[in-house]
């Protein structure tokens, strides 16, 4: 392979670059946070009422919901790669419309269009990443998506913060205009990227699939045992898939897919029900409740966005070693703890508050710096607990559990669930904070307890399995809490077999048919000649 294309076959580079799609998501989350507080914005749009402002904010997640649903069929039909290109184009158009808005109507149209782009990208980027990544680092590569989201939130927050100091009447437009830049970079970059090898194989473009796989895994060597074994597995699964029911949304809700589809959708819904986006959208209100105002509030908020970026890094580095289940379980247990503490501290040390010019914060801690600091500390710890766990895993898990024939549509549904709850909470939280004040945190804490129980009993461990093996894992009767200790992936054994066969063909080792013990899915032990290789992908070597 020519050196020029080296980068374009480096999984880290491809995975990292594709996450610019995730960055758009982050931009989207904080694209209003700074603008709404400026006089220029308020005067230009005639001081939108709070419900109109709510509509302006929520128009983006609403667009994203539909974008995520559209991404599934598009990803199958025009390819993952072209869907990312399409998302970039739509994003550029939406950003230009927002930046040039001459009224609320145009602003909302621009935000809906941007939302559609984000919905498309938020669904298809993790699918593309998971399909190009080898199983050993798949969790890490897909987690980059969440990292990019956190960067997007942070960068956009600071751009808006900075623009609030520019005296021009048009300053509030600058952050929306700047959004065009990542869209153009993503479009230009992705147009040079390879197609997903799994998508190519599914289109019967087998030679190209093998070529891309060889480039991604072995510097272009198609005979490399790793490439051969993975290619063989993809081929087996696609042939098997074709004997199954036709691909349609209806199939998603039938056995054996229903369980996986339900898990993917609930995982994404739970990730929103942790209350993390309350911390992202309404952090100013939380800190007002803790007794912070003005600049102190803005600085405290920015620390939280920085923590969100920093604490996603350990997840990226270690997710493939730690596994998905422990990370989810520990994350939600701690989040429940911090939320109960925030609610408890506010309940004990707070009192009804009538904050001038703000109708949302009706309960606050006054003149008790220790209690205020404790609430802020818990809120930071909450963000850290989310960033290291549910943030990345809520993307990794759905992108890896579905078979190819339904992957695109099923990830569409799980991503759309994220957006549906994102939208609902963006609306529901201000009135909740106003009416039941600090008790709102107890509701989210209770959700965190519920999700911990749900994960413990229902979510199998997926670390180190190939995408093709998931079928077997989810259809087995092994209880979820025992899946952590299952034997290693059979792909590793297949690779060893191919290597062994190659050595025999080379004459490097003797022709004696060594016997190896394997366990079939039904639990029987049997001896297989390693000379023959493993006849099907369904055997699991004894470890
Ligand atoms: O990092 C926080 C962000 O992460 C997400 O949950 C996506 O995984 C967003 O909804 C949220 O704003």
Image (spheres, helix red, strand yellow):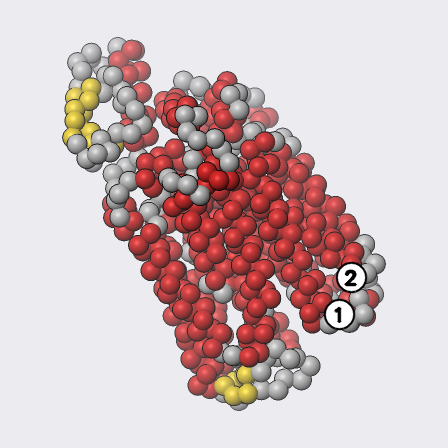
* Residue drawn at the location 30% of the way across and 11% of the way down: 506
| Residue closest to the eye, 242 or 132 | 242
Identify the image quadrant of the C terminus.
top left
Assign a secondary structure to mark 1: loop
Q: Residues within 10 Å of mark 2 (few under 14, many from 20)?
A: some
* Category of crowding for the residue at label 1, using alpha-carbon neighbours closer than 10 angstroms: few (below 14), some (14–19), many (at least 20): some
Q: Position of residue 447 (x, y in %)?
A: 42, 65
What secondary structure is found at the residue carrying circle 2? helix
Tell me: 107 left or right of 358.
Answer: right
Residue at mark 1: 48
The answer to whether residue 89 is seen in the rendering is yes
Answer yes or no: disc 1 within 8 Å of ligand 1.
no
Establish if 357 lies above or below 83.
below
Measured from the top left, where is residue 121 in percent x and y?
A: 59, 44
- Residue 104's label in the rendered image is 2
Does any portion of residue 139 appear in the rendered image? no
Residue 478 image position (x, y, % from top left): 25, 44
The answer to whether 263 appears left or right of 284 in the picture is left
Q: Are marks 2 and 1 in contact (CB under 8 Å)?
A: yes
Residue beneath the point at 61% across and 58% down: 29
Image: 427 above or below 324: below
Along the viewing direction, whichever of 263 and 245 lies nearer the viewer: 245
For the residues labelled 2 and 1, the Cα–Cα distance comes to 8 Å
């Amino acid at each position: 392979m020519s050196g020029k294309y080296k980068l374009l076959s480096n999984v880290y580079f491809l995975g990292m670059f594709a996450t610019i799609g995730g960055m758009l998501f982050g931009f989207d989350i904080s694209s209003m946070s700074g603008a709404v507080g400026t006089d220029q914005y308020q005067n230009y749009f005639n001081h939108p009422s709070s419900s109109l402002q709510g509509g302006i904010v929520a128009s983006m997640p609403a667009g994203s919901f539909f974008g995520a649903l559209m991404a599934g069929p598009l990803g199958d039909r025009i390819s993952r790669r072209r869907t990312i290109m399409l998302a970039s184009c739509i994003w550029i158009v939406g950003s230009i419309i927002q930046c040039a808005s001459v009224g609320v109507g145009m602003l909302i149209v621009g935000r809906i269009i941007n939302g559609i782009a984000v919905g498309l990208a938020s669904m298809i980027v993790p699918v593309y990443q998971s399909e190009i990544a080898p199983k050993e680092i798949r969790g890490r590569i897909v987690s980059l998506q969440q990292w990019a989201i956190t960067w997007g939130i942070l960068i956009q927050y600071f751009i808006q913060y900075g623009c609030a100091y520019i005296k021009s009447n048009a300053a509030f437009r600058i952050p929306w205009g700047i959004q065009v830049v990542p869209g153009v970079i993503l479009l230009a970059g992705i147009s040079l990227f390879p197609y997903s090898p799994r998508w190519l194989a599914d289109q019967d473009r087998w030679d190209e699939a093998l070529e891309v796989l060889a480039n991604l895994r072995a510097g272009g060597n198609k005979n490399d045992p790793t490439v051969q074994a993975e290619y063989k597995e993809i081929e087996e699964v696609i042939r098997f898939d074709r004997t199954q029911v036709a691909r349609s949304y209806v199939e998603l809700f039938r056995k054996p897919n229903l369980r996986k589809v339900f898990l993917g959708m609930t995982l994404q819904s739970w990730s929103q029900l942790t209350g993390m986006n309350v911390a992202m959208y309404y952090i100013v209100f939380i800190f007002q409740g803790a007794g912070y105002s003005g600049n102190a509030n803005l600085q405290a908020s920015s620390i939280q966005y920085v923590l969100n970026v920093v604490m996603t890094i350990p997840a990226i580095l270690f997710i493939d070693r730690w596994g998905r289940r422990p990370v989810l379980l520990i994350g939600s247990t701690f989040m429940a703890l911090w939320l109960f503490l925030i609610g408890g501290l506010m309940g004990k040390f707070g009192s009804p508050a009538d904050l001038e010019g703000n109708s949302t914060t009706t309960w606050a801690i006054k003149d008790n710096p220790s209690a205020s600091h404790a609430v802020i500390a818990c809120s930071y710890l909450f963000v850290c607990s989310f960033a290291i766990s549910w943030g990345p895993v809520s993307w990794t898990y759905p992108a890896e559990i579905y078979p190819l024939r339904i992957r695109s549509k099923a990830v569409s549904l799980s991503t759309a669930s994220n957006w549906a709850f994102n939208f609902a909470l963006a609306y529901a939280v201000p009135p909740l904070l106003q009416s039941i004040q600090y008790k709102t945190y107890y509701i989210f804490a209770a959700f965190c307890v519920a999700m911990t129980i749900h994960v413990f009993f229902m979510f199998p461990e997926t670390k180190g399995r190939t995408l093709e093996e998931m079928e077997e894992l989810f259809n087995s009767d092994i209880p979820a809490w025992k899946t952590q200790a299952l034997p290693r992936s059979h792909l590793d054994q297949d690779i060893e077999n191919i290597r062994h066969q190659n050595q025999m063909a080379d004459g490097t080792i003797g022709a004696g048919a060594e016997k190896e013990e394997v366990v079939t899915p039904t639990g029987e032990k049997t001896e297989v000649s390693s000379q023959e290789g493993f006849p099907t992908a369904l055997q699991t070597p004894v470890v």
